[in-house]
Image (cartoon, rainbow, N blue to C red):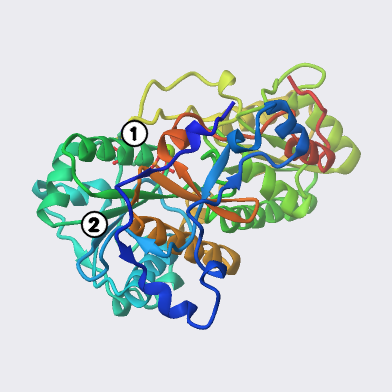
Amino acid sequence: MTTLADLQVSSLGPSRHDSPLGSYVAGRKTNEYYVSEDDRVLYDDTISLLEQRGEPVERWPSFEPGGPRARIFHDPATTHVGVVTCGGLCPGLNDVIRAVTLELYTHYGVTRVTGFRNGYAGLVPELGFEPVTLTPGLVGSINERGGTILGTSRGAQDPAVIVDRLVELEVDALIVIGGDGSMHGAHRIVEEIADRGLEIGVVGIPKTIDNDIPHIGQSFGFATAFAEAAKAITAAHVEAESAENGVGLVKVMGRHAGFIACYSALANHDADFVLIPEVPFSIDGENGLLRSLARRVREHGSAVIVLAEGAGQEHVRATGKSDASGNSRLGDIATIVREAIEDDFRERGEPLTLKFLEPGYGIRAVPADASDSVYCARLAQVAVHAAMAGRTDMVVGRRRHRFVHVPIPLVIERRHSVSPDGDLWLSVLESTAQPLDMS
Ligand code: ATP
Ligand code: MG
């Protein structure tokens, strides 16, 4: 169980400057605008969860709220902020870079904003990637394109070398936009900073197209990504319906978490089967994929299967390989499923028109939609407020519509995944033709 102690966010020290945002609150009660340092956002959201704690109110787990503080740690006149994007692409990266830069310049009056290129590699001088000076002019309309203007990379870098570089460039706060691996990396940078007794803050903005980072609510870019995946499912549905015994097989992202598969399938109700990493399925057997699919095709003439890339790993031989960051490479479940379906229809002497669609990288590269753009901008602003207030070793997130600060150790200790007993999976079962238990 997450406790109040787990939720304490680290700070570089007491705040020593008045926030320049004061000019925005002229004529208003400042407490309507600034976050009170004594306020907290409750972790639990039901009475029953709170009752289970059996603890006095002040010990109920709660988050530090995100938002502007009346007093801040860093002096905007001299503050230098670094920004880096790491890991895979995700819609909204450029929106975040843009909003961080604009918030710093226009609201805090910070004019030293540096973008490090190609992930953590950009903080390692010997690799030769010159940093970029981020200005409002440079970031003006970068949100119109997907990707990241800073570039990104995988692969381990030495935290000692990174901290040397931050010291050399007099960086006061580093904003890391990245996934679980990047947040592990950020935490190691924090440890190195703490060992040296430096006043450099590290604030994360979690980026995960799979929505697999815990505690932060829905991650930015996720809604854009599943909307894009839903288009492929619609296409597969149209193809399948137009053919004799048509089967559409759509492989979507989701190495360890099936959120994209679930949400994209729910977006248009065209999917008949949704296969995700969290819920094992059999290929053979009465309730297995082949017989369930055959029944569906017999009754409806066609069927659509949505397959998360990490589903059914029990049917795949482990590759034993990993990428530059040490993430293991998954076996190819799509080929196994596809061949099993083709063999099954052939053996039963039935025609089959199988169309395989893989939106894959296409869903990562698109620009954020309007709703995600707003979310990215607000997350970025909250991250800037946290960084200026001297917070460190934390990420920003939004739980139940409240922006909050979450300690990095808490977000890297486990992965968020679809609960097979939860209401999301139940909704998926309700909107598909698949048996409750396919294992
Ligand atoms: P995603 O998986 O969503 O694409 P990610 O941030 O998890 O994003 P990774 O490639 O795993 O992507 O990691 C990005 C950066 O973080 C890399 O430079 C990698 O070396 C560093 N990193 C990854 N895991 C760790 C770790 N356990 N400790 C320190 N650094 C790490
Ligand atoms: Mg990762």
According to the image, label 2 marks what residue? 116
For this orientation, the residue located farthest to the top is 285
* In the image, residue 267 above or below residue 246: below
* In the image, residue 347 above or below residue 358: above
Neighbour tally class for label 1: few under 14, some 14-19, many 20 plus, Cα within 10 Å: few
Instruction: Residue 353 in the image: state x and y as whole percent.
Output: 71, 43
Which residue is painted at 40% across and 56% down in the image?
386
Instruction: Residue 238 in the image: state x and y as whole percent.
Output: 74, 55
Q: Is mark 2 within 8 Å of ligand 1?
A: no
Quadrant location, the C terminus: top right
According to the image, label 1 marks what residue? 323
Neighbour tally class for label 2: few under 14, some 14-19, many 20 plus, Cα within 10 Å: many
Question: In which quadrant of the rendered view does residue 248 lie?
Answer: top right
* In the image, residue 70 above or below residue 314: below
Question: In which quadrant of the rendered view does residue 369 lie?
Answer: bottom right
Q: Secondary structure at mark 2?
A: strand
Instruction: Residue 159 in the image: state x and y as whole percent.
Output: 20, 38
Which residue is painted at 28% across and 35% down in the image?
188
What's the amino acid at mark 2?
A: Phe
Q: Is residue 392 visible?
A: yes
Q: Secondary structure at mark 1?
A: loop
Earlier residue among tags 2 and 1: 2
Which residue is painted at 24% across and 49% down in the image?
200
